[in-house]
Amino acid sequence: MAWHLAEKFETPDGYVKWASFGQGDPVVLLHGSPFSSYIWREIAPALARTRQVYVWDLLGFGQSEQREGQDVGLAAQGRIFARLLAHWGLSRPSVVAHDVGGAVALRALLLEGSEYGDLTLVDAVGGGQWGTGYFKLIRENARVFEQLPDYAHEALVASHLRHATHTGYRPGVLSSYVDPWRGPQGQAAFYRQYRQFEQSQTDELEPLLGGVAVPTRVIWGREDRLLPAEFAEYLRSRIPHATLTWVEGAGHTIQEDAPARLLSHLAAGFHAASL
């Protein structure tokens, strides 16, 4: 399906694109890396039947601006999110965050003074030693990877994206995820985020997680190979009263592997029983 974010919000490092659907109690959906708001393309319209849904592409991702010199680190993205909430006039929305979108949402909540009605973390980064393995290799050698020929770069991005799903992507979906990272500008932007997504930017959150006072739930794909079970247990144990729901047969991208089951959790009451 076509996915277009019509609205633009200016930041000191470039614009971010966003869109809103539906009416009702507001809910904001955050994506992670190397994804974009496209990952919510099926969830957002369905939620919009009863709620006002906001989506946006992180700076340097998806349809948002990509250019040299941008600060696209997690701290900067957290500040942008806090400013976006103020721009939208949202004081206590529901927030649903995936992957590094979890760190962005937690930084806005705990360090930028934003207020949420409730928080849902879906296979999300929020602490622990997440910046290891593939991520650490690219971050420490980003200048080398930036010099890859385009075919090798695109193969690397596609391979990483395939590793995120347990069931595989439907036709055309993988290409849509790779598209923002194609060409010289996209390739530079891809490795820019790795250089700037530092472990220290979530280490700051760890002593603050006990202060998360809003109702919080953790939803996790049982077959997640990027952020395995220990990261789900980490968040549940450190955020007071957080609940944990496993989605069987789904990997890191529950939105792709089990969209109907994820939607059922998000659309039901916050404390609905696990499905």
Image (spheres, grey):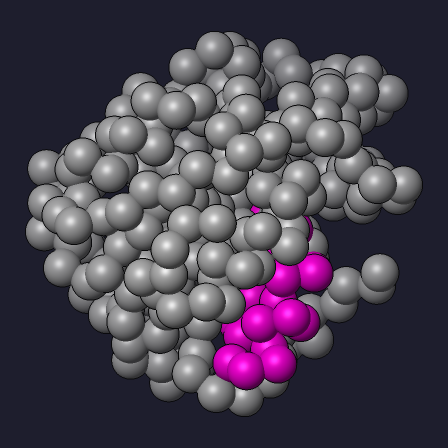
Judge by depth and name the residue closer to the eye, 189 or 87.
87
Instruction: Report the front residue among 24 and 250.
Output: 250
Image point (25%, 30%), residue name: 234
Where residue 23 sits: x, y (%)?
Answer: 54, 88
On the question of residue 186 being in view, the answer is no
Q: Is residue 40 above or below residue 234?
A: below
Q: Is residue 237 left or right of residue 42?
A: left
Residue 254 image-quadrant placement: top right
Query: Residue drawn 16% across and 50% down?
Result: 241
Q: Front-most of 236 and 115?
A: 236
Horizontal relation, residue 116 to residue 162: left or right: left
Residue 185 found in image quarter: top right
Q: Residue 46: within the magenta? A: yes
Side of 140 relative to 130 (left or right) = right
The residue drawn where x is 44% and y is 22% is 228
Quarter occupied by the N terminus: bottom right
Residue 180: image x %, image y %? Answer: 74, 45
Residue 247 seen from this side? yes
Instruction: Determine if the magenta segment contains residue 43.
Output: yes
Q: Position of residue 22 (x, y in %)?
A: 60, 84
Query: On screen, 50 above or below 171?
Result: below
Q: How many marks?
A: 0
Describe residue 103's horizontal placement relative to residue 14 as left or right: left
Out of 115 and 153, give the one closest to the viewer: 115
Query: Up-down: is 44 above or below 99?
Result: below
Give the residue drawn at x 26%, y 37%.
235
Quarter location, residue 38: bottom right
Which residue is at the far bottom? 23
As displayed, is residue 117 above or below residue 51?
above
Q: Position of residue 163 (x, y in %)?
A: 66, 22
Residue range in magenta is 39-60
